[in-house]
Image (cartoon, rainbow, N blue to C red):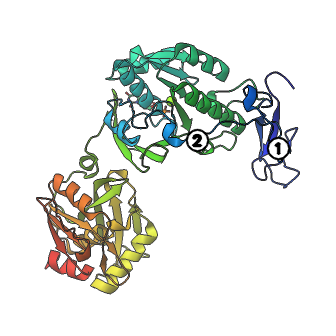
């Protein structure tokens, strides 16, 4: 055994261990499933003095182990409530209230979406608040990062920078400097000398992440790692790390638009599905405190074919505008084009509108657009989709102060949505005055400024809106 520790290759499919790499696991027969792993140095003798007693009857199972001492949970010290606020509110919000010391957080996202920019801003904020930071990049040179830092609104040039990719050097440096937060940009460029594989391979990425995690736990230093979402098979993406880290945030955007959503999909210290919204400007990322304004589009034009709904993004209600356009089609099959909405759900709603409300779309091209590049996945948006399409057919606006909350059933019935009180509160905050929804969903305490109108069916809704 070398002093570094031995490495083996493990099949990610069946778990079999192999001494050498091969393209195919000869135990289960799967291809490309072998991943290099470091075998921990034997634990025998590592226990302290008397604690390392042998376990009697189960000797063979416990071979090499030593007896550790459990303690009552109530004796555990430290507080989960201690969090560092970065002051970048949307970021703190997505994390569930700030950074938990000693945690490891993965920031995943497509290349170019703004992960490095975000973390540089976070580091700048922490540095300004007197918390030491260490920003390690294996992707960009110090000069490149400095140039980015100079563009940002936040004073980012105070951040400590290290251009390094060897894990051992990173850990030793971080341990010597002792910052509050270490940023590793990106995990795919880091490698340990203990493994043969190239940086970015599944084995390297997982081993480095596991050691960074141990480092965070042992030192109380918070570690952020960037993970690029990749399409090529050879490079390990953030998915392969999700089970290792404490918190997983994905940074997403929609092609042409400049807003970015930071979404928690795993959080050992808070709720998931929280989002933080930012806008990419020429001076870095700008937190968007009121996302509804962003997603409402240009609501000054009260044209037909537009309806607003309130969706829940995690625990946060966000108002979204939906635009429908029904136009006479030329020859052949009429078109159905949905952006940000499921095409089959659109077909279903069109059939319901036809059958239950007598609105025929058979001669019409139908276009549906969810404003702001958002994907409308909650059925709660059905009623707004129906209202936008009907409004376009009748060529009558639905009224600028109205929102629509409800799932539409196959019988044309309007079904209640969850957490209607929160949605109404957000709508009222944004100046909406009327909410069409199922009777049953009207909360006992209606937020001030908005009036709920109960409707049973879409036919009843259209009668109220357009007659
Ligand atoms: P970057 O943080 O490098 O993305 P990632 O680390 O996820 O690959 O951001 C890259 C993009 O952001 C790049 O196309 C330029 C743009 N950008 C701005 O628009 N404004 C800015 O102030 C900065 C720093 C970057
Ligand atoms: Mg980057």
Q: Residue at x 20, y 57 (%)?
A: 425
Query: Within 10 Å of the Cα at label 1, are there few (<14), some (14-19), or many (20+) other Cα atoms?
Result: few
Image height of 17 relative to 178, above or below: below
What label sits on residue 137 in the rendered view?
none
Q: Is mark 2 within 8 Å of ligand 1?
A: no
Nearer mark to the viewer, of 1 and 2: 1
For residue 443, above or below residue 74: below
Observer able to see residue 257? no
> Residue 153 versus residue 425: which sits nearer the camera?
425
Q: Is residue 253 above or below residue 153?
A: below
Judge the density around disc 2: few (<14), some (14-19), many (≥20) Cα neighbours within 10 Å: many
Q: Which quarter of the rendered picture does the C terminus lie within?
A: bottom left
Q: Residue at x 41, y 74 (%)?
A: 347
Q: Which residue is mark 2?
A: 238
Between 359 and 25, the one lying in front of the other is 25
Is 51 left, or right, of 299 in this rendering?
right
Query: Ligand 1 is in which quadrant of the figure?
Result: top left
Q: Position of residue 53 (x, y in %)?
A: 78, 34
Q: Earlier in the sequence, mark 1 or mark 2?
A: 1
Residue 6 is situated, as x and y percent measured from the top left of the image, at 82, 30
- The quadrant holding residue 344 is bottom left
Image quadrant where residue 418 sits: bottom left
Q: Secondary structure at mark 2?
A: helix
Secondary structure state at the residue bearing disc 1: loop
Residue indicated by mark 1? 56
């Amino acid at each position: 055994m070398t002093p570094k520790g031995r490495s083996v290759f493990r099949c990610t499919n069946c778990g079999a261990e192999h001494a050498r790499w091969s393209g195919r696991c000869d135990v289960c027969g799967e291809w490309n499933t072998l991943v290099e792993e470091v075998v921990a140095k034997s634990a025998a003798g590592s226990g302290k003095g008397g604690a390392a007693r042998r376990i009697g009857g189960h000797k063979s199972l416990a071979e090499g182990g030593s007896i550790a001492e459990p303690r009552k949970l109530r004796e555990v010290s430290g507080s989960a409530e201690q969090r560092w606020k970065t002051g970048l509110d949307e970021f703190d919000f997505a994390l569930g209230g700030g950074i938990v010391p000693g945690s490891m957080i993965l920031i995943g996202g497509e290349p170019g979406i703004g992960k490095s920019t975000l973390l540089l801003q976070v580091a700048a904020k922490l540095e300004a608040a007197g918390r030491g930071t260490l920003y390690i990049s294996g992707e960009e040179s110090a000069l490149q990062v400095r140039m980015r830092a100079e563009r940002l609104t936040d004073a980012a040039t105070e951040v400590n920078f290290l251009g390094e990719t060897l894990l051992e050097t990173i850990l030793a440096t971080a341990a010597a400097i002792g910052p509050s937060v270490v940023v590793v940009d990106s995990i795919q460029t880091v490698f340990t000398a203990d493994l043969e594989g190239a940086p970015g391979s599944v084995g390297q990425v997982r081993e480095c992440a596991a050691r960074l995690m141990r480092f965070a736990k042992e030192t109380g230093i918070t570690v952020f790692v960037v993970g690029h979402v990749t399409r090529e098979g050879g490079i390990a993406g953030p998915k392969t790390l999700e089970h290792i880290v404490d918190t997983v945030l994905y940074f997403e955007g929609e092609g042409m638009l400049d807003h970015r959503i930071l979404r928690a999909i795993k959080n050992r210290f808070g709720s998931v599905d929280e989002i933080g919204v930012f806008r990419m400007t020429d001076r870095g990322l700008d937190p968007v405190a009121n996302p509804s304004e962003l997603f409402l589009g240009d609501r000054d034009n009260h044209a037909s074919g537009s309806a607003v709904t309130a969706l829940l993004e995690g625990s946060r209600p966000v108002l979204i505008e939906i635009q429908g356009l029904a136009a006479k089609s030329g020859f052949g099959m009429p078109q159905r084009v949905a952006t940000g909405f499921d095409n089959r759900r659109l077909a279903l709603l069109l059939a319901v509108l036809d059958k239950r409300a007598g609105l025929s779309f058979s001669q019409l091209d139908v276009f549906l657009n969810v404003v702001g590049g958002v994907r409308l996945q909650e059925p709660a948006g059905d009623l707004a989709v129906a209202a936008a399409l009907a409004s376009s057919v009748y060529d009558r606006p639905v009224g600028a102060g109205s929102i629509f909350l409800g799932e539409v059933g196959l019988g044309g019935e309007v079904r209640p949505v969850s957490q209607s009180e929160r949605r109404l509160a957000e709508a009222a905050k944004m100046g909406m005055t009327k909410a069409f929804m199922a009777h049953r969903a009207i909360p006992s305490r209606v937020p001030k400024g908005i009036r709920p109108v109960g409707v049973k069916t879409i036919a009843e809704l259209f009668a109220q809106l357009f007659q």
